[in-house]
Image (cartoon, grey):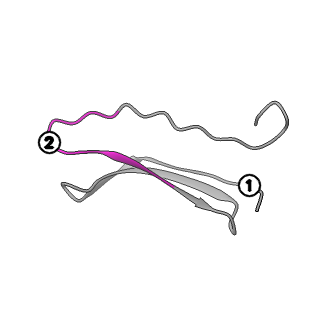
């Protein structure tokens, strides 16, 4: 939560691989009030489920 009482999220990533290109994907769903984040590697067509997270009860200005 920010100083003004607004919900806020921050994702920090330093993911290195010698065989693929991991990329963090962030999906914002304003209807469900969620922010979902996960890491996938398109080159090898894999996702790293241990880095999946979802923040709920977000409030977005439309």
Q: Is the magenta stretch mostly helix, strand or loop?
A: loop
Q: Position of residue 16 (x, y in %)?
A: 27, 33
Mark closer to the chain start, 1 or 2: 2
Q: Name the residue under label 2.
A: 19
Relative side of 32 to 59, left or right:
left
| SS for callout 2 | loop
**Could you say which is closer to the camera, residue 30 or residue 49?**
30
Q: How crowded is mark 1: few (under 14 residues within 10 Å), some or many (20 or more)?
A: few
Query: Above or below — where is 45 with respect to 20?
Result: below
Q: Quadrant of residue 30?
A: bottom right
Q: Position of residue 61 (x, y in %)?
A: 77, 57
Structural distance between the alpha carbons of marks 1 and 2: 37 Å
Image quadrant containing the C terminus: bottom right
Q: Where is residue 38 in the image (x, y as percent from the top left)?
A: 44, 51
Residue at 81% of width from left, 30% of height from top? Answer: 3
Residue at 23% of width from left, 59% of height from top? Answer: 45
Region in magenta: 15-26
Q: Name the residue under label 1.
A: 57
Q: Does the magenta stretch include residue 44?
A: no
Relative side of 32 to 54, left or right:
right
Residue at 77% of width from left, 55% of height from top? Answer: 59
């Amino acid at each position: 939560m920010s100083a003004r009482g607004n919900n806020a999220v921050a994702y920090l990533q330093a993911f290195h691989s010698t065989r693929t290109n991991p990329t963090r994907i962030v999906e914002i769903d304003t209807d469900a009030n969620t922010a979902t984040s996960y890491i996938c590697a398109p080159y090898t067509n894999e996702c790293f489920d241990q880095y999946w997270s979802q923040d709920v009860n977000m409030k977005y200005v439309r």
